[in-house]
Image (cartoon, helix red, strand yellow):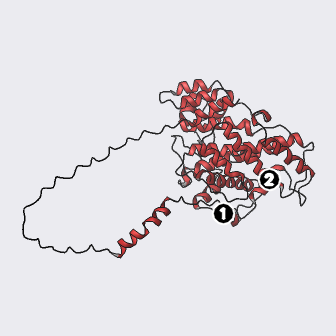
Amino acid sequence: MANTLSKFFNRLFGAEQDAPVSSQPGSVSLPPPEVVPAPKAPEPVIVAQPAPVVTPQAQAAVVATPEAAANAAAPEKLIAWKPALPVDSLFFDWIMGYPGEGSSLIDNEQHALQALYKLLASDLNDAVIVPRVPSVIPQLLNSLRSKTISTGELSGQIVKDVVLVGEVINTVNSALYNPADRINSLEKAVMILGEEGLRLVISKVAFRPIINLNAGKFTRRAAPHIWAQSEKCAVACHTLARDMDPFHAFLTGLMKNVGLIIAFRLLDQVCVQGKFKYSPAFQPIFASVAATLSYRVAQRWEFPAHVILALQQQTGGSKAIEWSPLGRLLHTADLIAKTRLLVNHAQLNSADKKLRLGLSPDEIHCLDHLNEIQLYDTTGVQQHPEAEPQTQARSVGQ
């Protein structure tokens, strides 16, 4: 299992080789010229040279150089968004189906947390059954890296997986692409999606069976909402990615909730009743354990180091987090996606000004238009949140 997933994600991310750096030859020092004693001559007249004039600006520059160099070397400290509303706890109550009760940790909570901690201490491959990645997907991702692959050859590989065929056809016929007539040709659909569109579709197909599960009572109730939030988180990550790979950001957003769905599957096993009382303290602990599971699974699947770090930074803790760019992006996109879903389902009021406090203009635009944002148009041109309104597709969000 681990080997299959490792091969899949190795093909997904690809290996980057560092270009060799050629060294410049050093300068050749010449020997000093031979000194020939001169004949006696009258003593030379020494003319005093004026001392160089040091301007105040030059002197200040010399004095400030060490500090300036130190400041320039220090990376900019990234600050994560802290919503004015309790978005995380509101989202948890919503996917649980009922608000928490009680003022302190109670027996059912303790039992559930003990099971979660035991899971963290175990080998996740043995303890949790993660659905296998469809066999056709690694082949497709490998083909997408080839510059000579034809549309017909790609279609021939996609047709081997019924789920993937359905996803490709549904995507090109959705409001994102809004074709004049329904497209039923797989080859035409592949041509419209383009390479980047196919990568996004394939990634969604790979993650959906992992997250959108219908097992026990807790998972059956929560999984559809968790999957909807995962999709929106991935779209927000992709849309707001700046100076980083947007596809890696998209996958990191999809990966965020893998641990959460595993934790809910564990609740199905340890909680006989489909409902139990939980205190306000339970949600942040549960969320931290779920985030830890996500980054542990990412390690086993051999995700790139910067993706694992971004996931690890979501686990929280008492110490202040030194955010990486991708970690901060994931934190913000996750909260934006939760807020968007809570507004969509009338759990929050979209007119509440507190929803947008602390967000940048791009992030506010992403929150307001997350139901509509399309990642790629029919020519494969990336769409960013600052795009003109007429380029945005109609609403397809939940």
Q: Comparing marks 2 and 1, which lies closer to the viewer?
A: 2
Q: Which secondary structure, mark 1?
A: helix
Residue neighbourhood size for the residue with mark 1, other residues' Cα within 10 Å, grouped as few (<14), some (14–19), many (≥20): many
Residue at image point 10% right, 71% down: 43
Left or right: 25 with respect to 208? left
Residue 292, position in %: x, y? 73, 46
Residue occupied by mark 2: 285
- The vertical placement of 62 against 153, above or below, is below
Residue 299, position in %: x, y? 67, 40
Residue 22, position in %: x, y? 38, 41
Q: Which secondary structure, mark 2?
A: helix
Quadrant in the picture for the N terminus: top right
Left or right: 363 with respect to 128? left
Residue neighbourhood size for the residue with mark 2, other residues' Cα within 10 Å, grouped as few (<14), some (14–19), many (≥20): some
Residue 40, position in %: x, y? 7, 65
Amino acid type assigned to the residue bearing label 2 in the image: Ile
- The vertical placement of 24 against 102, above or below, is above
Q: Is residue 321 visible?
A: yes
Amino acid type assigned to the residue bearing label 1 in the image: Arg
Residue at image point 41% right, 70% down: 63
Disc 2 to disc 1, how far (Cα)?
A: 26 Å
Q: Which mark is residue 356?
A: 1
- Sequence-wise, the earlier of marks 2 and 1 is 2
Q: Is residue 220 visible?
A: no
